[in-house]
Image: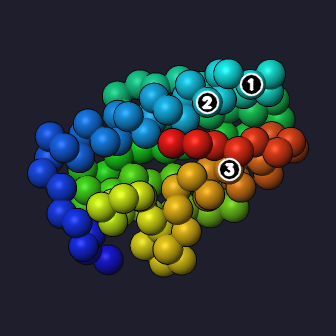
Amino acid sequence: MNSPFPLEESDYHQRVDAVLEAVEAALEATDADIDTEINGGILTLEFANRSKIIVNRQTPNREIWVAAKSGGFHFYFDGAAWRDTRSNESLESLLSRVVSEQSGCVMPITI
């Protein structure tokens, strides 16, 4: 799906950097045993059970991609929020759900 709100490359990178940093900060502010690392525009979350969630930029498509145990998800920016290209679920909602599933505790993520 093409974004109804096309982003210039510099704006796209700023928005993705802000998302990655916000997710990392939200998780680091909890007592959960989740290791986070941002490297080269890729946020890796590693859980106590050794499962991982990867959040990364997909610059050619101006999307954010998420890989979790439950599947792969692609998000476009709609002018207000990042939305899944298939379900229209928000990135916040998806991350809250998959982080909760993989960590074993409720983990609301606010971006």
Against 59, residue 16 (above or below) is above
Disc 1 residue type (three-letter): Thr
Against 39, residue 47 (above or below) is below
Disc 3 residue type (three-letter): Ser
The residue pinned by badge 1 equals 30
- Residue 33 in view here: no
First in sequence, mark 1 or 3: give its number.
Answer: 1
Q: Are marks 2 and 1 in contact (CB under 8 Å)?
A: yes
The residue pinned by badge 2 equals 26
Q: Nearer the viewer, residue 85 or 80?
A: 80
The residue pinned by badge 3 equals 96
Residue 29 rendering spot, x and y as whole percentages = 68, 21
Q: Nearer the viewer, residue 63 or 54?
A: 63
Q: Considering the numbered disc 1 on the image, is that residue within a helix, a strand or a loop? A: loop
First in sequence, mark 2 or 3: give its number.
Answer: 2
Q: CA distance from mark 2 to mark 3?
A: 11 Å
Residue at 45 percent across and 65 percent down: it is 83
Q: Considering the numbered disc 2 on the image, is that residue within a helix, a strand or a loop? A: helix
**Image position of 91 (left or right of 48):** left
Q: Considering the numbered disc 3 on the image, is that residue within a helix, a strand or a loop? A: helix
Residue at 24 percent across and 73 percent down: it is 4
Q: Mark 3, residues whose alpha carbon is within 10 Å: few (<14), some, or many (≥20)?
A: some
Q: Quadrant of residue 81?
A: bottom left
In the drawing, what numbered circle is on residue 93? none
- Residue 79 in view here: yes
Disc 2 residue type (three-letter): Ala
Residue lying farthest to the front in this orientation: 80
Q: How many marks?
A: 3
Residue 17 rendering spot, x and y as whole percentages = 35, 34
Q: Nearer the viewer, residue 70 or 27?
A: 27
Q: CA distance from mark 1 to mark 3?
A: 13 Å
